[in-house]
Image: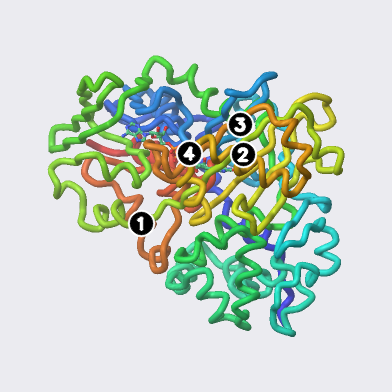
Amino acid sequence: MKPVRGLSVLTKVHAEPEQEHVEMIKRGLPQPAKKKRIIVLGAGMAGLVSASLLKEAGHSVILLEGNSRVGGRVHTLRKPFRNGDHFEGGAMRIPSHHQLTMTYVQKFHLPVIPFVNATDNDLIYMNGKLVRRFMYEDNPDLLAFPVDEKERGLTAVNLLRQAVAEFAEQYVAGTKNERGRLLARFARFTKDGFLRENPLGESLSDIATYKINTMLGIGGFHHLSFTDILLNITSTIFGDNVDFFQIKGGNDQLPKAFLPYINDHLHVNRTVMRIVQDNTGVQVTAEDERKEQHVYFGDVVVCTLPFSVLRLVDIWPHDSLSFAKQRAIRELVYVQATKVGIEFKRKFWEDDALYGGSLITDLPLQFMYYPSHNINVPGPGILKACYAWGENANLWDAMEEEERVDRALSYVAHIHGEKVKKLATGGVSVSWGSNPFSAGCFSMFKPYQHGELPSVIRQPEGRIHFAGEHTSRLHAWIEGAIESGVRVAEEVNKRII
Ligand SMILES: Cc1cc2nc3c(=O)[nH]c(=O)nc-3n(C[C@H](O)[C@H](O)[C@H](O)COP(=O)(O)OP(=O)(O)OC[C@H]3O[C@@H](n4cnc5c(N)ncnc54)[C@H](O)[C@@H]3O)c2cc1C
């Protein structure tokens, strides 16, 4: 059998940015030949990056945001909690090898602390058994998954590593073009399809595939692309030697750090309804919270709206968008996610030596994350009591807010004992599937799309340029949004109108 390299090599190679993008964040865009009037749609990370770079290069910029806040899917909640603590409703961990994100963190002098993603003491509750991670790693058969004889003695991560070893070797060794060809070649596989009918190695049994799905929390991604899930989810979150950070005091400080550069050009509570373009320019109509319409004129639009909600925007004339782009907007899938945060009077989990890290379970809550800030500080703490993904989030989305918090609390009590119920002082949930500004958590390709869709999604259409996590190589990460924001700023800066 081939030596199996860590998944972390794969994620690091995949995430390597163009060095010129790092330089642009540090030093800005080159001076343009001609200044343009640019309307940027959406003040999430992609919109903030492109708007600030373009403004700094001397263009006239208007940034329109439908919500009352900036940051989009980077969303830190401080209410209804007491004691000034916070809960990350959206992005919570920043891999240290995400260079573009770290460059902004350094540029804005934001303090970071470790995000403890996993520890040997992590809890695993599967098939009715509660164990620590180190116990399961010593004996991967402890959780009683009835896998085939040849699959015994292997953890879910090691089963996955073996199954993808040849693909990972080829990807890591490949040039940019070879990687593109590799993605196109294996784009037709769903995650389960690749594992069960492995075109590059030994196929796994049904139960081993189920073990990977449940242990790695990707069971709710059945119909989605093997390559996208491997490169953007599992290799990062379950890669050995991947360090994660969070911004001290809340990740929303990253989007907020752009405000001094862009505040005079930002219009919040402006939901974009219509874009009209012709040879002379582009006109954007947005509605405020009183449903009054505002019209903005420009030379170029940068659209960072997730395709899930761009479908609601009327783009005119109809044929100013290519057939391929219209189809991509309609067909790109957004994975759902729902989180529940519960505040407790004291950090009872620290009594069990849980300092950061997680619980992974086949219970509906899927993941629980123990806070890795304020460790060993006496007093209250907020538990990410539920983090359900993909189809697993549907169940939580079907509940009212109060029921989500109650249910999550009863599962916390199932693991940690009834006594913890008395310590709970309040909770909140964030359902990204019900969020009108993204209608989902992140984009993920279906089979075949990884080969065909990336260039279509990125391609400018007339005067409209596209950015956002969904237009990048790094679906599901802030890094992808930033990469796209820099790429589109460069594109628009160079554009001759
Ligand atoms: C639950 C969850 C967990 C995540 N975890 C992580 C993580 O741990 N680490 C990580 O790096 N990334 C994580 N991500 C992904 C990361 O948050 C996103 O990839 C990134 O923030 C997307 O930025 P964006 O600018 O592309 O899109 P968005 O942030 O969605 O920005 C789009 C903006 O457009 C606005 N908008 C939408 N419609 C309209 C309209 N019609 N008119 C005007 N404005 C509109 C929205 O309000 C929003 O501000 C997570 C995301 C979620 C949801």
Say which of 348 and 476 sits in front.
Answer: 348
Tell me: 36 left or right of 416.
left
Viewer-nearest of labels 2 and 4?
4
Measure the alpha-carbon separation of dots 2 and 4: 24 Å
23 is higher (above) or lower (below) than 447: above
Viewer-nearest of labels 1 and 3?
3
Query: Three-letter amino acid code at disc 1?
Result: Ser
Say which of 333 and 496 sits in front.
Answer: 333
Residue 451 drawn at (x, y percent): 40, 66
Query: Three-letter amino acid code at disc 4?
Result: Glu
Report if the beta carbon of the residue with label 4 is closer than 8 angstroms to ligand 1: no
Viewer-nearest of labels 4 and 1?
4
Identify the residue at horizontal 39%, vertical 36% (top origin).
Answer: 489
Tell me: 342 left or right of 472.
right
Instruction: Return the disc, 2 or 3, that comes first in the chain's sequence.
Output: 2
The C terminus, quarter of image = top left
Instruction: Return the disc, 3 or 4, that comes first in the chain's sequence.
Output: 4
Q: Quadrant of residue 57?
A: top left
Identify the residue at horizontal 85%, vertical 43% (top origin).
Answer: 352
Residue, disc 1: 455
